[in-house]
Amino acid sequence: MELPKIGERCFVATCSQLDFLPISCNYCSQTFCKDHSLPMNHECSSVPDNSISDDQAVATIESYPCSSDACDVRDVIELLCTHCKKHFCVSHRHHGCMDPRREAQRARRERFEAPKRQFNQAKEAVNKMLDEKIEKNRALSGTKKDTANKIQLMRIKQKATGRKNVPISSRTYFLAHWIPNGSTEPQSKAVFVNKEWPLGRVVDEIGDQCKIITDPNPSSPKLRLFHMSGEILCEDMSIQLQKLLEADTVIDGASLIIDFQSPANVESSNTSDQ
């Protein structure tokens, strides 16, 4: 494939440099590179007696004054603004004539984005109402509770994250709630874990998904899972999640709180169980 013709070669035989911005001599009308653009540099035969001053030589080169006020820069290459079609030097290429056009573009963009923003706000409001209704029905019994649980599980599955190597048939979904360090606003995240894992690994995985930083020191508070009522899910971290599901201690799609429990509370709880 032939390349398009780009630039011109300097007319000086000993140079022949390909210049992408060639300069034409006003005397002989030939094109030259920047180094040979002045008449004395290419021994221009069209100049009378072949002797002109430096100022005269510079004056023979066509130049373009910057259109910005109080700017005396002249360029040998014309740089026209695509909007006002005037020449400006590099320093004044952003001269403000595009501002009205940009404002008009922003106004048009706002007209397109406003409906999207309103739709997202309405969707968020509907989701909030649906969440409240689901939680209300889950506190009941019978058909309404079962339906609410199924809807909750379906919504969690749509946005849950977890390890991709967990088989779909072994995945159990939870909506985890926690309060990040240094914040008073609770956050929530849909996650999935392997029902064949022990509860301790389930807690660690949910903690990692929620980016909760733990302290490995044995005396530090430990992460635990709690029901929304505040009751701890289970004290035994070695028990398999599958057994808790079979015993209806927790259900697939449940909302749980993940929070720290101090070792002292764990010991007192174990003592009271005995």
Image (cartoon, rainbow, N blue to C red):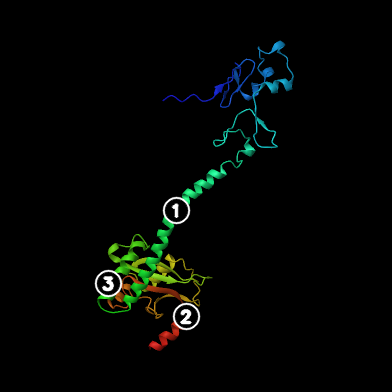
Instruction: Judge from the rendering whether residue 238 lies leftward or rightward of residue 25; answer left or right.
Output: left
Residue at the image position 53 percent from the left and 45 percent from the top:
102
The reply to whether dot 3 and dot 1 touch (C-beta < 8 Å) is: no
The answer to which of 126 and 16 lies nearer the viewer is 126
Residue at the image position 41 percent from the left and 74 percent from the top:
257
Q: Quadrant of the N terminus?
A: top left
**Which badge, 3 or 2, is on the more N-terminal residue?**
3
Checking the image for residue 113, the label placed there is 1
Alpha carbon distance from label 3 to label 2: 38 Å
Q: Which residue has dot 2 on it? A: 263
Residue at the image position 72 percent from the left and 20 percent from the top:
56
Where residue 21 appears, x then y in whole percent? Answer: 58, 27
**Which badge, 2 or 1, is on the more N-terminal residue?**
1
Where residue 148 appears, x then y in whole percent? Answer: 30, 72
Residue at the image position 42 percent from the left and 59 percent from the top:
118
Of badges 3 and 1, nearer the viewer stands 1
Amino acid under disc 2: Pro
From what the image shows, is residue 73 above or below residue 239?
A: above
Quadrant of the rendered image containing residue 90 = top right
Q: Quadrant of the C terminus?
A: bottom left
Alpha carbon distance from label 2 to label 1: 52 Å
Report if residue 265 is visible in the image.
yes
Q: Which residue has dot 3 on it? A: 147
Helix, strand or loop at disc 3?
A: helix
